[in-house]
Amino acid sequence: MFGLMQHHPLLISSLLVHAERHHGQQEVVSRRIEGDIHRTTYRQLAARARQLAKAMAALGVGDGERVATLAWNGYRHLELYYAVSGMGAVLHTLNPRLHPDQVVWIADHAEDQVLCFDLTFLPLVEAVAARLKTVKHFVLMADRSHLPASSQIPNLRCYEDLVDAQDDAYTWPVFDEERASSLCYTSGTTGNPKGVLYSHRSTVLHAFGAALPDALNCSSRDVILPVVPMFHVNAWSLPYVACMTGAKMVFPGAGLDGKSLHELFEAEGVTVSAGVPTVWQGLLAYVEANGLRFSTMKRTIIGGSACPPAMIRAFQATYGVHVLHAWGMTEMSPLGTVCSFRNKHLAMTEAERLALQAKQGQAIYGVDMKIIDGNGAELPWGGEVSGELLVKGPWIVDQYFKGEGGQPLIAGWFPTGDVALIDADGYMQITDRAKDVIKSGGEWIGSIDLENIAMAHPGVAMAACIAAHHPKWDERPLLVVMKKPGATVTREELLAFYEGKIAKWWLPDDVVFVDAIPLGATGKMQKNKLREQFKGYTLPTA
Ligand code: ADP
């Protein structure tokens, strides 16, 4: 027997329709590349998204065709999110921080038809336009006054002209919710990047899951500022969650430095933000140096790489901003787990809570996870043994775009490439990425733990722990440290700092100081580059 309820496909356009009808006056505020602060509402944004959908159709964009963006977080990017997916085409968010050759490779692979880009990326697009095989139209996301007088870009169009040329009489088409909505490539630290093709259904379900109280906990009372870029896994779904909940949205544009962010947080009454640890480091340093506070911020979601407990403590104890440590990946839309408290945790001491918050947390409904040993057997929960982490759920990848990389699943589960522990309550903690694990005499040393401890030292700005070759143990930990400006910390002090915090045999064999630790296109430490740099490094022998 079937249920007798209405059937409405879960389409991304329905999120915008909801925001327009039920939260029409809610604001969307953007720091523009043009330099000013722009204000609009969901009502106006929805009307412009309809105009834009018509404009894209007029350019010849058909069902399932890819429209790419090279853009910061801003209202025009949000219009594209909804217009492109809503009309039945596929939004392809390109990462402008990638090397131009990679941008070209990915755009070709995706067969992008239209490329929309912010003024900032005009030089990048000028440099690569002639090499893009499939792009027919280039759209500068600005008004006519910002169009260059002359350009090598063929078919350069003006976003505002395209929008202005259409009226907003447009009805979002209704189609199968399993159809593709957007495309995002993994950053490809090993091999070529692979495309993850999200569907309308996976995106809407993911937004439901993400908005839940034990996940990102968003409501219409929130003012959300995603620092995480809209070109990095859909800004962790916040552009969808904001429309779903009717929250006010604030976009930082290109202003990701501590000063610009703090100003916007305060001026717009931001309550929730989200980003990778390296961004928050800049913000915290600025706030500390200038004796500032956060007067409206309630919580911040930190993920993308492990959030050092020292950062969690600084946000919570010094500034009263609660940290939600989250884990996920491009292949998971991206959210898998979030570390929120249960009732029993509320009675914990601060130190116990910080230890809990160093974990990546509990699975959101919709995601199931397990850890396995080297033979594929499931390992018990309880926090004792780590293993490779596998996940499954309706917003997790089944196959990569165009079948690249073969069949990724193992008996229906997606292997994440992360190594983790799961405690008795189901709180998961990433100890490493499989490829970053340090194998000392056959035993694994988790580099994240070692980094977290180093980053709790007041003189350390950033620390990466990598495997260095050792004649007896095969690999031993080498700690690579970037000091805080003006700090005088020494190798001996740092090694002594580990005392009592880890098993003795985990102690790094050596410490090297560097001026900078290389960061990838999504703000993560590039340990593969460091391993390359220290390939021939000779560890001191005891
Ligand atoms: P890429 O895999 O290309 O680096 P993703 O943004 O998809 O891009 O990265 C996903 C990976 O980032 C995860 O598999 C995990 O290794 C790491 N990661 C994400 N969040 C966390 C976190 N909170 N703690 C530790 N590692 C994390």
Image: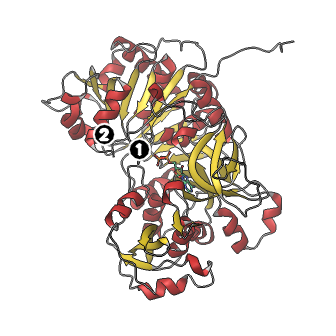
Which residue type does callout 1 highlight? Gly
Residue 196: assigned label: none
Task: State the mark number for residue 102.
Answer: 2
The amino acid beneath tag 2 is: Gln
Q: Secondary structure at mark 1?
A: loop
Q: Is residue 221 among the parts visible in the rendering?
A: no
Q: Position of residue 378 (x, y in %)?
A: 72, 49
- Residue 19 spot, x, y in % from top left: 60, 29
Q: Are marks 1 and 2 in contact (CB under 8 Å)?
A: yes
Residue 103 is situated, as x and y percent measured from the top left of the image, at 31, 37
Is the residue 342 above or below the residue 183 in the image? below
**Residue 507 lies in quadrant:** bottom right
Dot 1 alpha-carbon crowd within 10 angstroms: few under 14, some 14 to 19, many 20 or more: few
Q: How many marks?
A: 2
Quadrant in which the N terminus appears: top right
Against 342, is 347 above or below? below
